[in-house]
Amino acid sequence: MEPFRIHLFVCTQQKPEGVTSCPASGSLAVLGALDREIQARGLNHDMQLTTCGCMGLCDEGPVMVVYPAGVWYRRVQPSDVCEIVATHLGDGKPVDRLIWNDAPAMKAMAVEHGEKFRAAMAAREKAGVLPDRLDQMIRVYMPSRCLLTALELDIFTAVGDGGNAEQIGTKVRANARAAGMLLNALVALGLLSKSGDDYKNTPESARFFVQGSKDNHRNGLLHTANIWHRWSTLTDAVRSGTRVPSSRDDTPEWTRNFIAGMQRNAKDRAPLLVKALGTTGVRRILDLGGGSGVYSIAFARACPDVQCEILDIPEVVPLTAGYVSQAGVSAQVSLRPGDMLEDDFGSGYDIIMLNAICHMFSEEQNRDIFRRAHQALAPNGRLVVQDFILDSEKTGPQQAALFSLNMLVNTDAGASYSEFEYTHWMKAAGFTEVCRINLPGPSSLIVGLVK
């Protein structure tokens, strides 16, 4: 059975730098060109484009196979794509100059490749060579740190329409030689291009990292740069059991970047949360630690009758006010400076939200918040916790387990918690019908009802 008239496979098997592979020969560009051309011609419902692993024909890449006819193409380039789509996929006439139909030679090459690969793996195993997976895990910080430094220095904005290392270094107040080394590394990572001595932004870096761009993410990503510095204290934090104080903490700039980072992370998730909870019967919402107000804003936009109140620390509230005003929902979203660990919540709320909050606190602090939230909710009101949810062994999902360490280096007693823990705390506080609602992405909801 063939659900699609044509099925295309393009090899995208990544291999170590310097090793012959289809991606090294341009298969990712071919894949992108194929997808665009198929979409442009309205053929996307008639054929399926699929990536695949190594076919053992690396020296002849990029390699592509078209089924059901089983036509093999080799050394395909983006410039060949229009012809392939029009002639072969459209008219049913394969492009002869790209076809590889020497089956014995193809089989011999694939068999030889497989034998060499297995022999190389056996030799590495015998010699005790560190597996690539572990080596990459250890070194993965390098490109991350390179990009974060570029964001901290605002390199991409300084590059602008182009410039050399000395010009760009002067703009960011950096040494010209060192700036050149960083710029070259950014070229190697595909984040800049270079012609002669001049550097330019790629379309991707210009869109996401340049100040003034509509989709600029730099300000939010600076929070990630701050977190990187905290993670460098992990060894000491594990030894001491809590975060190591830093002069970088709790400055106005740190707070601004933190709120921008939370806004960046949550803006796509907020409508999903509103849809999952619904607005029927919801009139009053208390948003604890609401930050940028992104979730309250989403509720206000979804229902004109909803009134939201955001409780956050005094340093954050002016920033929240800016986001709420920009969203045009100031009439529905009020702000209250305070401390959720100490202040009275009030009463009569239909929903109390804790979005990405509980991981900042200890078990005892969360239990107390849940108890006071139960008292502040109206009958049939709901407490909603959105967070990373660990499994019963606390060893996964991976992102939740790693985020628990993020809380170790950033808070006094925070952590990621399991579904069992959240459920137990809610029931102990008096909530009934506690349930989990999974959302797309890394975090989920735990919801408890007041009877």
Image (tube, grey):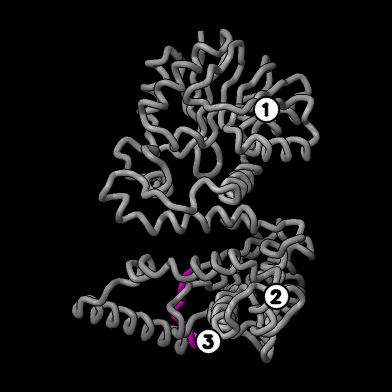
Residue pointed to by mark 2: 159
Q: Is residue 161 above or below residue 362?
A: below
Bounds of the magenta span?
A: 53-61
The mark that comes first in sequence, 2 or 3, is: 3
Quick check: is 332 in the magenta stretch?
Answer: no
Q: Secondary structure at mark 3?
A: helix
Q: Which one is closest to the eye, mark 2 or mark 3?
A: 2
Where is 196 relative to 94, above or below?
below
Residue 334 drawn at (x, y percent): 71, 25
Comes first in the chain, label 2 or label 1 = 2
Q: Position of residue 227 (x, y in %)?
A: 48, 54
Q: Which residue is mark 3?
A: 60
Please state which of residues 259 and 434 is positioned toward the viewer in this rendering: 259
Quarter of the view holding residue 94? bottom right
Quarter of the picture containing the N terminus is bottom right
The residue shown at (56%, 11%) is 380
Circle number at residue 335: 1
Mark 1: amino acid:
Leu
Identity, as a three-letter code, of the amino acid under mark 3: Glu
From the viewer's side, name the closer residue of 40 and 271.
271
Q: Of helix, strand and loop, which one carries label 1?
A: strand
Image position of 199 (left or right of 50): right
Give the side of residue 201 with respect to residue 396, left or right.
right
